[in-house]
Amino acid sequence: MARSTFLYVTYIRTTPEKLWSALTDMEFHKQYWFGMRCESGWTAGSPWKLVSSAGEILDSGEIVEAEPPRRLVIRWQHQSKPELKAEGASLCTMELEPNGSAVKLTITHTLEREGSKLIEAVSGGWPKVLSNLKSLLESGSIALQEAYPA
Amino acid sequence: MPAPRRDTDLLFKALADPGRRRLLDLLHAHDGRTLGELCEHMAMTRQGVTQHLDVLEAANLVATQRRGREKLHFLNPVPLQEIYDRWLAKFERPRLRALANLKRRLEKTDG
């Protein structure tokens, strides 16, 4: 089946446990996700949503798999823009593997449609979010304050 | 797998070759390609392309995924974002501030 996939890999000098909590802690999200936060119970079947700093629900879905501190799968549907919402749900898989003194974080974001606009849209955001996350965990401060600086 | 300390060296070394930059451009245009598909667009041997892909993968610029018997190659933009954050954004700020100061000074003189 035709699909759109983006794959992101980063090596972060931390432990799988710390990285897992950074990925699943709403207060931690705000520090590296440009003010946005994910809300969820973080167990399989629990609802999940990505909320802007103004409180708007940008994306929502549910946790498909949660295996701390190794694997998290989210069914992820955009909610804010009608043309992206119409594409249906995407699947975002986060895998954490110890790698020497670091953790390899692999994020795979897939939608069963060729040339997905949603996947295109998230592709601009993920590298910035991950670069900030790496910087925050390794040095205690983020690299970028705004996703799209003027 | 890259040792953390050598990340940056591997990254710039990987980017220093035109053939490897072409491979990144090819993946940017169309992600998730097999070795065979990439070879069609490269004027070099299959072995040469494999070696370049290995260097790109060691620098974490290319990530691979197995799908059945195929190995698919993806452009991983995260290290490029790190270069941007570390080497560009940092140096851009003083320059923008200098321009803002210049503008303020010139406009004050005019007024």
Image: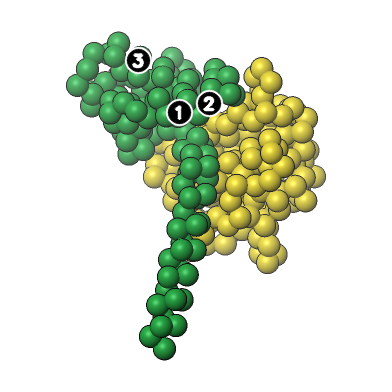
Chain colours: A yellow, B green
Q: CA distance from mark 1 to mark 3?
A: 17 Å
Secondary structure state at the residue bearing disc 2 = helix
Secondary structure state at the residue bearing disc 3 = helix
Q: Nearer the viewer, residue A111 or B9?
A: B9
What residue is shown with label 1?
B11
Q: Amino acid at mark 1?
A: Leu
| Count of numbered circles on the image | 3
**A23, above or below A77, in the image:** above
Chain for mark 2? Answer: B
Q: Nearer the viewer, residue B106 or A85?
A: B106
What residue is shown with label 2?
B7
Q: CA distance from mark 2 to mark 1?
A: 6 Å
Residue A107 x %, y %: 58, 34
Horizontal side, residue A25 vs residue B78: left or right = right
Q: Quadrant of residue B74?
A: top left
Residue A126 visible = no
Q: Which residue is found at the position 75% from the left and 47% from the top?
A: A28
Residue A22 x %, y %: 73, 40
Residue A101 x %, y %: 69, 21
Residue A105 x %, y %: 62, 30
Q: Mark 1 near mark 3, Cβ–Cβ under 8 Å? A: no
Q: Mark 2 near mark 1, Cβ–Cβ under 8 Å? A: yes
